[in-house]
Image: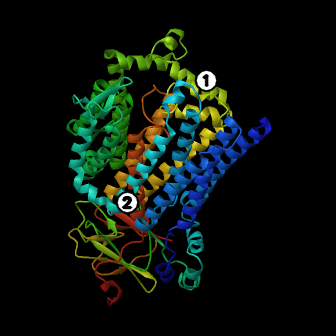
C-alpha cells in the first residue's frame, strides 16, 4: 500500500478484501444450496456436502491466490460471480443425479467437479503464463487458422463423431469417454483473430462508404470478410448441424465489427444476411427445418410425440410454469422429467426449483460478469485489448441469450450450453480460459499508468 | 422435514441469492453511478495511510482524470497521478493509439506546480491544444481538447 500513500491523487484500489468476502459469500451460497437439496430429498444434510463445499471452496481459494499474485489489479467481481454460476450448476447436476430417472443416471456431479478443477487449473495457467495479453495480437493469423481448423475438425473422418444429431465432437477412435467439443475452444481463437484483424483493417471498413437513405452502405468489396464469415457459419450450420455455434460465430463477428467501426449498417447487413441464410437453409435442409417447426408449433400433438420433436422444449416450459414466481424449492420439483435437463435445459431445471426470482438473480449475475467485461473494454488503453475484451464479454452474453432464448421458445432452440452451468467439460474449460483472459485484461486496464521511460519530465526547466 | 421449514429455507435461499447480487452491485457502485462521486469514494478506499497526504495536496480545480473524447479510443479514462502520461503508437505509451497520423512517441503530459503541461515529442503531424499547434510545453486548462492524430483528449475534474 506504500505506493498508494505516496500518490497525491487517490489511485483505483485493488479491492482484494471485497473480492475475498464476495468469494466466501459465493461458496456459502453454493453450500447452502447443497444442504437445501439434501434436506428436501432425504430430510438430512447430505453427507457429500462438506466434500463438495470444501473442494469448491479450496479450488476458489487457490484461484484467488493465483489471481492476487499474478493479476493484483484485476477486477474484484469477476471470480466471485463466476463461482456462483459454476457452483449452482454443480448443485443442480447433483440434484438431478439424486433422482432415479434416465436424466438422473446420465448426470454425473463428480465428473463435473473434476472438470471444474481442470478449469481452475487452466485459469491459473493462463494467468501465470500469459503475462501480457497483447502477445496474442502477434498471433492474429495463427489464431485464425487454429480456430478454423478446430471448427472443421469434427468433419475429419476417424476422429470426428456425431452425437445426438450434431457432428461437433472429436475423440480418439475406439475410446468412448475421451471426446471433446473443439468448437468451444475455436470460439476463443476466433475472437482473438477477429480482434487482431479488425484492429488492422477497421479504418478501411469504417471510412469508405456511400450514403443511401439514412444508413452508410460500405463498398461492395469491403463486404468480403463479412461474406466469408457468413459462409463459414452457414457451413457449420449445414455440415455439422450445429445451429448454436453458427449463430454464436456470426453474431460475435458482427458485434466486434460494430465495436470496431461504430457503424450500425454492419449490424443491419449482418442480421439480414443471417436471417436470409437461415431461412434458405431451413427450406433446403431437413434438420434445420425441424427446428423451425418445433419453434413455431411446440404444443402440436404430433410434433410432441415425434422423436427429436418438441417434447424436450415443452417439458422445459412446463417446468418453468410449475416453478412460478418463487419456485418449488431446491430438491422439491421434478426437473428430472425434462430430457437432458443437466445440459441444454439446466436453465429450465433451475427455473422450476428457484422460480422467476431465482432465474432473475442468475441472469443478473451473468449480466454483471458481462458488465465487468465491457467495463474492462472501456478502460483498456489500446485498441486490441478493447476489441478482445468487448468480443469476449459479448460472446458470453450472446451465448446466454441464445440458450435462454431457446429454452423459453423466444428463438428457435439451438444446442448450446449455458456457460459454466451445463454439464460438459469442453465448454467449462473454454469458459474458464475466457474468464482468465478477461481477468488478465482488467488487471492491465486498472493498473496505474506505468512510469514514463525517460524521467526528465520531472526535472525539466519550463519557461512561460 | 416439515413443509413450513422447507418454505422458509426456500425463501431464505432466494433472499441470500439476491443479497449476493446487491452486494456485487455495491462493490462496483462507483462504476455504475459515474465518476462524480469517485474522488470521495476513492479517498475512502485508499484507507488511513493515504488520507493525511491526500487531503492537503488535492486543490480545487486540479484535474483528476484524462478522458478521450474523440477517435477510436473514445470513452477511455485514465486517472491522473504524479506520473507523466505519454501518448503514441509505441506499445509502452500510457495511451496507445493505432492511428496513421500519430507518431510512436507523439506527445507527453506531465504535472508541474499543480498544472498539467502538454509537450509535443517531435511528432510528424503535430499536437494541437484547442486550435493552436503545440510548439513548446504549454499548460493545459480543464476541458480544453488536445488533438493527437484522430484522437481527442481532455482533462476533467
**For the residue labelled by badge 2, is the local secondary structure a helix, a strand or a loop?**
helix
Q: Outermost residue toward the top?
A: A302
**Residue A351 place in picture, x, y as percent:** 60, 34
Residue tagged by mark 2? A127
* In this view, A201 is above or below A68: above
A65 to the left or right of A168:
right
Q: How many marks?
A: 2
> What is the quadrant of residue B13 in the picture?
top right
* In this view, A165 is above or below B50: above
Q: Which mark is residue A255?
A: none
Q: Residue at x 47, y 31 (%)?
A: A344
Looking at the picture, tell me which residue is in the foreground, A461 or A304.
A304
A371 to the left or right of A262:
right
* Marks 1 and 2 belong to one chain: yes
For the C terminus of chain A, which image quadrant?
Answer: bottom left
A302 to the left or right of A237:
right
Looking at the picture, tell me which residue is in the foreground, A454 or A461.
A454
Residue tagged by mark 1? A318
**Residue A278 place in picture, x, y as percent:** 35, 24
**Residue B12 place in picture, x, y as percent:** 72, 46
Looking at the picture, tell me which residue is in the foreground, A385 or B34.
A385
Q: Residues within 10 Å of mark 2 (few under 14, many from 20)?
A: many
**For the residue labelled by badge 1, is the local secondary structure a helix, a strand or a loop?**
helix
Q: Residues within 10 Å of mark 1 (few under 14, many from 20)?
A: some
Q: Please report, as a chain letter, where disc 2 is located.
A: A
Q: Residue at x 70, y 41 (%)?
A: A44
* In this view, B42 is above or below A437: below
* In this view, A301 is above or below A107: above
Amino acid at each position: 500500500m506504500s505506493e498508494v500513500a505516496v500518490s497525491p491523487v487517490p489511485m483505483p484500489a485493488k479491492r482484494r478484501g471485497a473480492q475475498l468476502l464476495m468469494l466466501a459469500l459465493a461458496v456459502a451460497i453454493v453450500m447452502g444450496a447443497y444442504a437445501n437439496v439434501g434436506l428436501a430429498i432425504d430430510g438430512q444434510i447430505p453427507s457429500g456436502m462438506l466434500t463438495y463445499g470444501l473442494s469448491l471452496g479450496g479450488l476458489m481459494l487457490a484461484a484467488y491466490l493465483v489471481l492476487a499474485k499474478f493479476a493484483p489489479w484485476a477486477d474484484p467481481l469477476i471470480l466471485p460471480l463466476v463461482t456462483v454460476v459454476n457452483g449452482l450448476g454443480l448443485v443442480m447436476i447433483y440434484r438431478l443425479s439424486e433422482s432415479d430417472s434416465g436424466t438422473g443416471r446420465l448426470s454425473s456431479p463428480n465428473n463435473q467437479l473434476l472438470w471444474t478443477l481442470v478449469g481452475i487449473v487452466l485459469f491459473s495457467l493462463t494467468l501465470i503464463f500469459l503475462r501480457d495479453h497483447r502477445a496474442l495480437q502477434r498471433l492474429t493469423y495463427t489464431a485464425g487458422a487454429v480456430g478454423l481448423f478446430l471448427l472443421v475438425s469434427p468433419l475429419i473422418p476417424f476422429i470426428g463423431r456425431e452425437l445426438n444429431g450434431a457432428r461437433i465432437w472429436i475423440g480418439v477412435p475406439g475410446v468412448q469417454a475421451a471426446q471433446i467439443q473443439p468448437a468451444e475452444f475455436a470460439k476463443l481463437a476466433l475472437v482473438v483473430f477477429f480482434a487482431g484483424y479488425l484492429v488492422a483493417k477497421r479504418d478501411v471498413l469504417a471510412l469508405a462508404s456511400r450514403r443511401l437513405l439514412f444508413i452508410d452502405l460500405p463498398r461492395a468489396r469491403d463486404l468480403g470478410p463479412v461474406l466469408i464469415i457468413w459462409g463459414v457459419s452457414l457451413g457449420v450450420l449445414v455440415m455439422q448441424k450445429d445451429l448454436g455455434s453458427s449463430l454464436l460465430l456470426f453474431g460475435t463477428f458482427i458485434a466486434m465489427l460494430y465495436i470496431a467501426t461504430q457503424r450500425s449498417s454492419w449490424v443491419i447487413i449482418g442480421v439480414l444476411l443471417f436471417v436470409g441464410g437461415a431461412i434458405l437453409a431451413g427450406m433446403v435442409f431437413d434438420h434445420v427445418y425441424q427446428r423451425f417447426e418445433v419453434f413455431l408449433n411446440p404444443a402440436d400433438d404430433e410434433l410432441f410425440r415425434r422423436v427429436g420433436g418438441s417434447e424436450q422444449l415443452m417439458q422445459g416450459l412446463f417446468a418453468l410454469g410449475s416453478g412460478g414466481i418463487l419456485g418449488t424449492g431446491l430438491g422439491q420439483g421434478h426437473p428430472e422429467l425434462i430430457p437432458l435437463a443437466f445440459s441444454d435445459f439446466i436453465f429450465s431445471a433451475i427455473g422450476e426449483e428457484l422460480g422467476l426470482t431465482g432465474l432473475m438473480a442468475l441472469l443478473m449475475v451473468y449480466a454483471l460478469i458481462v458488465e465487468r467485461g465491457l467495463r474492462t473494454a472501456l478502460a483498456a488503453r489500446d485498441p486490441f485489448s478493447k476489441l478482445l475484451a468487448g468480443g469476449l464479454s459479448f460472446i458470453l452474453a450472446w451465448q446466454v441469450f441464445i440458450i435462454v432464448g431457446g429454452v423459453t421458445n423466444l428463438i428457435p432452440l439451438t444446442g448450446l450450453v449455458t456457460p459454466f452451468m451445463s454439464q460438459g467439460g469442453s465448454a467449462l474449460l473454454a469458459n474458464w480460459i475466457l474468464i482468465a483472459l478477461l481477468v488478465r485484461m482488467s488487471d492491465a486496464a486498472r493498473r496505474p499508468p506505468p512510469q514514463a521511460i525517460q524521467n526528465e519530465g520531472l526535472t525539466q526547466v519550463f519557461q512561460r | 422435514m416439515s413443509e413450513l421449514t422447507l418454505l422458509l429455507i426456500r425463501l431464505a435461499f432466494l433472499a441470500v441469492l439476491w443479497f449476493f447480487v446487491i452486494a456485487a452491485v455495491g462493490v462496483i457502485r462507483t462504476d455504475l453511478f459515474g465518476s462524480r462521486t469517485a474522488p470521495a469514494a476513492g479517498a475512502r478506499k485508499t484507507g488511513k495511510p493515504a488520507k493525511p497526504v491526500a487531503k492537503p495536496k488535492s486543490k480545487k480545480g486540479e484535474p483528476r482524470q484524462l478522458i478521450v473524447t474523440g477517435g477510436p479510443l473514445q470513452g477511455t479514462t485514465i486517472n491522473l497521478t504524479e506520473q507523466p502520461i505519454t501518448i503514441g503508437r509505441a506499445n509502452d505509451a500510457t495511451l496507445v493509439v493505432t492511428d496513421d497520423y500519430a507518431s510512436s512517441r507523439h506527445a507527453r503530459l506531465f504535472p508541474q506546480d499543480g498544472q498539467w503541461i502538454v509537450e509535443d515529442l517531435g511528432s510528424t503531424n503535430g499536437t494541437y491544444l484547442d486550435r493552436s499547434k503545440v510548439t513548446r510545453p504549454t499548460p493545459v486548462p480543464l476541458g480544453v481538447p488536445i488533438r493527437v492524430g484522430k484522437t481527442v483528449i481532455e482533462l476533467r475534474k
